[in-house]
């Protein structure tokens, strides 16, 4: 299933307007290119609405939030929503400050995202309004804690993709779980940001199936992480893993995907 969704990305080459943080913008753009999509990383408020309206999907990431980026994301989100384009909201560190909570709430109301992608701490904070996150790190929550994701999906009408040792994807009714991946993802700044960007591409290429598209993006990222870790050589670390992760995405074929899943 996931290989079919990836094939659609490569066939349609969707334009993904990604307003992400400056720490991860390059990796997000390269991963989108490796998957077969076409990234635009515009974040100037003067042009984001126009670009969002012509793009095939929009990804809004709170990572390095500023007043200017808040305005840019709001304009892009409204334009994409008006044009019925899929939107991914990545509420990075939403529980760490009032500014992030305010911005996330505004985007939920005004942009009505198709998918919300975050770790367990971010999903809990977004649903409950709780504070106290340590930056963008995941708090020590039970791995099986998926109730916040399900309730947030019901509350917002968005599909929620909650990442962790096991990724959980829900529309409030159905709950899908994606196993696998690599612990090395935790050592790469922006692995979640890359997944959010990839989810935008999968939504654009499979617009009528947001739940399955989000799950397929998560599984594709998981497979690429497993391949990247397997191919690390002695003495290589997280920098090499990041490069091999993007390489794995670039070289991933439906045949390799199926073979890898059969062997896993």
Image: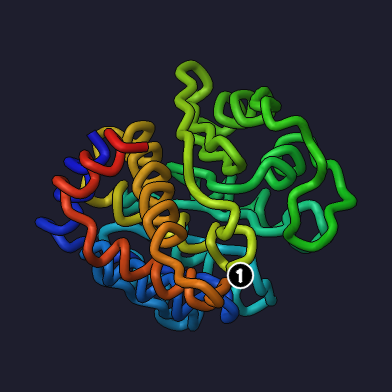
Residue situated in front as seen by the camera: 109 or 176 = 176
Instruction: Relative to 141, say whether 45 is above or below.
Output: below
Residue at (60, 48) in percent of width and height: 118
Q: Position of residue 203 (x, y in %)?
A: 31, 47
Q: Depth check: give the residue in front, 133 or 238.
A: 238
46 up-or-down from 20: above or below: below
Q: Is residue 34 visible?
A: yes
> Which image quadrant for residue 54?
bottom left
Q: Residue 58 or 1: which is nearer the viewer? A: 1
Point 49% across, 83% down: residue: 44
Image location of residue 78, percent across then percent down: 45, 57
Image side of residue 36 versus residue 72, left or right: left
> Which image quadrant is residue 109 in?
top right
| Residue 167: percent from left, percent from top | 53, 37
The reply, left or right, for residue 97 in relation to residue 242 is right
* Label 1 Cα neighbours within 10 Å, binned few <14 / some 14-19 / many ≥20: some
The x, y position of residue 12, in whole percent, is: 13, 57
Give the position of the N terminus as an image quadrant: top left
* Residue furthest right as drawn: 132
Which residue does the numbered mark 1 point to in the structure image? 189
Please give the name of the residue rendered at 43% of the width and 42% of the height, measured from the top-left corner.
Answer: 114
The residue nearer to you, when weighing 136 against 258, is 258
């Amino acid at each position: 299933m996931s290989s079919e969704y990836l094939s659609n990305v490569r066939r349609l080459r969707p334009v993904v307007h990604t307003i992400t943080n400056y720490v991860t913008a390059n990796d997000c753009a390269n991963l989108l290119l490796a998957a077969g999509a076409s990234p635009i990383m515009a974040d100037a408020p003067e042009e984001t609405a126009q670009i969002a309206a012509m793009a095939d999907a929009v990804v809004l990431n709170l990572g390095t939030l500023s007043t200017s980026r808040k305005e840019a994301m709001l304009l892009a989100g409204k334009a994409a929503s008006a044009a019925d384009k899929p939107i991914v909201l990545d509420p990075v560190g939403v529980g760490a400050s009032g500014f992030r909570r305010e911005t996330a709430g505004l985007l939920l109301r005004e942009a009505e995202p198709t998918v919300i992608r975050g770790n367990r701490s971010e999903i809990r904070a977004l649903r409950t309004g709780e504070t106290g996150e340590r930056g963008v790190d995941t708090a020590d929550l039970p791995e099986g804690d998926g109730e916040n994701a399900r309730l947030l999906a019901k509350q917002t009408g968005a599909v929620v993709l909650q990442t962790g040792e096991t990724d959980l994807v829900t529309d409030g009714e159905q709950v899908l779980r994606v196993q696998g991946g690599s612990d090395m993802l935790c050592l790469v700044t922006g692995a979640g940001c890359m997944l959010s960007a990839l989810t935008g591409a999968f939504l654009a290429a499979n617009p009528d199936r947001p739940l399955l598209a989000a799950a397929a993006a998560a599984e594709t990222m998981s497979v690429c992480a497993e391949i990247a870790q397997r191919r690390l050589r002695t003495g290589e670390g997280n920098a090499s893993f990041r490069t091999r992760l993007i390489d794995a995405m670039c070289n991933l074929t439906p045949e390799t995907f199926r073979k890898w899943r059969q062997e896993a």
